Image (spheres, rainbow, N blue to C red):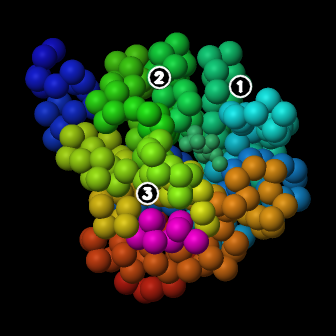
Amino acid sequence: MNKSRKPYQLVSKEWQADDTILEVNGSHIGGSNFTLIAGPCAVENREQLGAIANYLSKKGVHFLRGGAFKPRTSPYSFQGLKEEGLKLLREVGDRNKLNIVTEVMGTETIDLVAEYADVLQVGTRNMQNYPLLKGLGKIDKPILLKRGMSCTVEEWLLAAEYIMVGGNPRVILCERGIRTFNKATRNTMDLGSMALVKTLTHLPVFADPSQGTGIRELVLPMTKAAIAAGADGAIVEVHNQPEEALSDGDQSLYFDQFDRLISACESYCQLEGKQFQISNPTSKTIQQN
Ligand code: PEP
Ligand code: MN
């Protein structure tokens, strides 16, 4: 069993040298692929989600994000539409041929969220919720595991190990910024650790420049930086009316900013030898899955 001398085993490159490539309804995550997950911070209503999903599917994006269960710092803030939000995600996702990525906050809702989602997200606040991680080890859906805002790389990899040793090998790691003394950005994107993690694990590693910076103008440069640092994908918040958003409006991209992000991903993926997983590439040389 003890193939690696590190405290984690199954997640390590010593355990498995080849990159893990996850297949989700015909889309591929990991290996030489670069995948975008995009959508609002939270599902707010049918019109909002429909407008965003329609736009994203026209752009050729394969994964729609949106929180139905929202972990909010204040109990007075919008907490999400819960099951109604999950139903909307499924309905709108199916209509637009988009896979659904959404957060699961507790063990009691794992089965419910898994019924509607294609990928289940574990938020930063729950990265060390061990009963939740154990529960997610028992399901047959990929898990997007955000890095805890005050967690070390080792703690993050051990959290992924919990899911894998529980029986679910389909884990995606996601760097979303950590807490530092610097308050100029919402969090500090730790792309150095993200690049390091790529050398330690065979699992796909994503970047979340939206939570990572909290400032929409910084999402594009940090996505470029993440590709240069070896990211296998990015999860990005985009909204049809960011100024009206019920959560994280300041870090949500306008559609025209997202257009520019897609073009940049095409160029940067080419530079890095990554295949950008998008159905309508504007550049003819980009390969499709
Ligand atoms: C989110 O993706 O909207 C979110 C709440 O993420 P995190 O858990 O990384 O803060
Ligand atoms: Mn958010």
Q: Earlier in the sequence, mark 1 or mark 2?
A: 1
Q: Quadrant of the N terminus?
A: top left
Q: Which residue is mark 2?
A: 128
Say which element carries label 3.
strand
Q: Quadrant of the C terminus?
A: bottom left
In this view, the mark in front (1 or 2): 2
Q: Amino acid at mark 1?
A: Leu
Q: Nearer the viewer, residue 201 or 119?
A: 201
Q: Which residue is mark 3?
A: 233
Say which element carries label 2.
loop
Q: Which residues are magenta?
A: 217-224
Q: Are marks 3 and 2 in contact (CB under 8 Å)?
A: no
Q: Which residue is mark 1?
A: 112
CA neighbours of label 1 inside 10 A, class few (<14), some (14 to 19), many (20+)? some
Say which element carries label 1.
helix
Could you tell me residue 219's position as x and y percent? 53, 66
CA neighbours of label 3 inside 10 A, class few (<14), some (14 to 19), many (20+)? many
Q: Nearer the viewer, residue 287 or 196?
A: 196
- Mark 1 CB lies closer than 8 A to ligand 1: no
Quick check: 207 above or below 119? below
